[in-house]
Image (cartoon, rainbow, N blue to C red):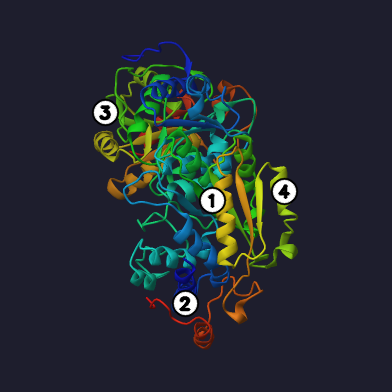
Amino acid sequence: MENYINHGDKDTRSGFGEGLTELGRSNENIVALCADLTGSLKMNEFAKENPERFFQTGIAEANMIGLAAGLATGGKIPYTGTFANFSTGRVYDQIRQSIAYSNKNVKICASHAGITLGEDGATHQILEDIGLMKMLPGMTVINTCDFNQTKSATIEISNYDGPVYLRFGRPKVANFTDVSKKFEIGKGLKLKVGSDVTIVATGHLVWEALKASENLSEKGINSEIINIHTIKPLDEEIILESVSKTGCLVSAEEHNIYGGLGESISRLLATKMPTPQEFVGTKDTFGESGTPKQLMDKYGLNSSSICESVINVLKRK
Amino acid sequence: MYEELNKLVPQVRRDILRMVHAVNSGHPGGSLGCVEYFVTLYKTILEVESNSNQNDMFILSNGHISPVYYSTLARSGYFDIKELDTFRKINSRLQGHPTNHDGLPGINISSGSLGQGVSVGLGIALSKKLNNDPSIVYVLTGDGELQEGQNWEAFMYASANKVDNIIVTVDCNGQQIDGSTDDVLNIGDLKQKFESFGWKVLEVEEGNSLDKIHEALTTAKENSKKGKPTVILMKTIMGNGVDFMMHTHKWHGVAPNDDQLKIALNQNPETLGDY
């Protein structure tokens, strides 16, 4: 992979855990809450180092969200941790009223997002959470792609005053982003310059997009790769600048194509620069049990699906 | 003290009635039932100083009784009483249900979707403990509202974690939109339920008596910071102070018409000047 080296597979949730631990040491206003998934969310270290600032809520997510809203009202910066499904759909009204409408400085941190949660199956694999959260006025929505990015995002969102949804995952995946690069909310990253097609990816699909780009090169297709980690607010400039050059776009995400990053991009393009677009994502379906790799392949969330979509979108230019 | 409060009570009732009448919507029944609680809390219990960051805080969980909240806040100096005239109207900070979204002074959080206020109050109480802030968090909830499960998550959390700087009051008026709480979904013996959840329980039989409310809130305050959260089960009469609105759920979310307003206002003479 030109310029991008996998420094060893690591899970994004461990990036969250490390980021949170560092924050705990540097900022005494940081507090963390977890609904009985401390180990899964990698929050143990923070809890051990800051027992008075860690709140184990038990299996009671609604109360956890309310506690976080209250802690923020009292001037703290709460980080809530549980699986993405229980961080969003289960507590949507609590987030909507007590956090979003009330503009509370709460960081809703969600692990095990998407289909790569794996063997637990569809009850736990939420593929609708980006849509749910981006529809809330004032909510910032971030989906990080690797360990390094998740760690820096975790730290950086503490400097932003307002509600944030931070989405990451369970499996160990390539860790390739530049560790020294400061995370900027709302700023897309151009990972590779190209001229034929723009591929915009978020989360676990970013590495797949880079792999796809190599395969496409072999076929003589020169792709531009953009990593959008902040789905809302969307970096419109980087996308428009790219498609003004390439004239077509493929979006890729581990999420339902309804309500995800792809839809945000198509709204942008429809209003500012109508452009052919293809969508890589789940096609309005629930997931199922399986290994992350099997599921990514079965549901078309991999580099070959991206390549296929590129071929299709090029025909529509 | 009571001279002032006795003047305030009918005036707040007038505000409530005139506010809901003006927009032909809103919730007069529960608002009227809690007038005595609100004026007692704001005028005799809450310790708030503008320069301090260690102030007592109040959270209204049953946000639909916003008229009594707004009237009490305005008449306690949080904003001009003239603003009460904007209640539920376009471009107002006095939304149908209370919110901090538009910067209305005195409101700390949005409420209306029920069952969320106790959790929020607990979160504030936890932040006070972290800050070594000795002040207290007060929360009011409805009784029908306790049908929402989140409350019980919060009650369990509070006692398990000894959150003892919070005083929750339950407005036990026995009514909700569809009828009496006994008929809609019987919430059973609240005293036993709270005690089994590890809470200190105080009961007020006359929740529309300024004296009794003051006594209960004072006792609760004395009991605070002793390892247990405190709840006051406050029996109130919905629609209190307007004879045809009392003892029924019918005025939960219905505004009086012109004639009804006239009768209701006659029962509550102007004492401090209408807005």
**C-alpha span from label 1 to label 3:** 54 Å
The image's mark for residue B203 is: none
Q: Does residue B274 appear in the picture of this structure?
A: yes
Location of residue A122 (image quadrant): top right
The residue indicated by pointer 3 is A195
The three-letter code of the residue at mark 3 reads Ser
The image quadrant where one finds the C terminus of chain A is top left
Residue A215, percent from left and from top:
40, 19
Query: In the image, is B141 to the left or to the right of A162?
Result: right
In this rendering, position of residue B212 left or right of residue B71: right
Residue B233 vs residue B46: left or right?
right
What chain does mark 4 sit on? B
- Give the mark toward the camera: 1 or 3: 1
Circles 3, 4 touching at the beta carbon (< 8 Å) = no
Q: Residues within 10 Å of mark 3 (few under 14, many from 20)?
A: some
Same chain for mark 4 and mark 1? The answer is: yes
Choose top left, top right, bottom left or bottom right for residue A120: top right
Question: Is there CB contact under 8 Å for labels 4 and 1?
Answer: no
* Residue A155 position within the rendered picture, expressed as x and y whole percent measured from the top left: 37, 26
Marked residue chain, label 2: B
Residue in view at x 61 percent, y 64 percent: B207
Q: Amino acid at mark 1?
A: Gly
Residue A255: % across, % down: 50, 36
**Looking at the figure, which quarter contains the N terminus of chain A?**
top left
Please give the label number shown on residue B117.
1
For the residues marked 1 and 2, what is the alpha-carbon distance in whole angstroms? 27 Å
Residue furthest bottom in the image: B259
The residue where tag 4 is placed is: B193
SS assignment at label 3: loop
Q: Circle 2 sits on which residue?
A: B14
In this view of the protein, which residue sits in the foreground, A128 or A51? A51
Q: Disc 3 and disc 4: Cα gap in Å?
A: 68 Å
